[in-house]
Amino acid sequence: MGNPTDPEIDVWLRRHQARTELALRCSMRGQFDAAKNSADFNARIDELFAALYPSEAEYAALLSRAREIGAAVATVLNG
């Protein structure tokens, strides 16, 4: 994946349920500088947090899922 902020990827991400989208975006932000440094990408994460307003336990579960996704992506990218 070259640029996780590509509009096609944004469309794909928005097709998921909000919690899944948020986990995917958090994972991508942790893996890719382009996502980490994108104002639009991070604004969407903020929007999702505001809409979902996760409890501490939900937030912890979300970050755990994001780490799992990130590990899987790293495995694929690094062979």
Image: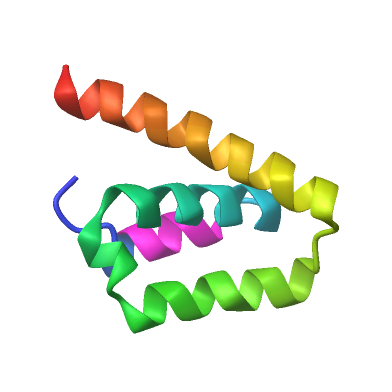
Q: Give the side of residue 3 with respect to residue 20, left or right.
A: left
Q: Is residue 5 visible?
A: no
The residue shown at (72%, 40%) is 61
Tell me the chief SS of the magenta region: helix
Q: Nearer the viewer, residue 66 or 1?
A: 66
| 42 up-or-down from 61: above or below | below
The residue shown at (43%, 54%) is 12
Residue 32 placement: quadrant = bottom left
| 45 up-or-down from 25: above or below | below
Residue 65 position within the rendered picture, expressed as x and y whole percent measured from the top left? 60, 36
Total numbered labels: 0
The quadrant of the picture occupied by the C terminus is: top left
Q: Nearer the viewer, residue 1 or 61?
A: 61
Q: How is the image coloured?
A: rainbow
Residue 73 position within the rendered picture, expressed as x and y whole percent measured from the top left? 33, 31
Residue 75 placement: quadrant = top left
The residue shown at (19%, 58%) is 3
Q: Give the side of residue 27 with respect to residue 5, left or right.
A: right
Q: Is residue 75 visible?
A: yes
**Magenta stretch?**
9-15
Residue 70 position within the rendered picture, expressed as x and y whole percent measured from the top left? 40, 36
The quadrant of the picture occupied by the N terminus is: top left
Residue 67 position within the rendered picture, expressed as x and y whole percent measured from the top left? 50, 36
The question of residue 56 being in magenta is answered with no
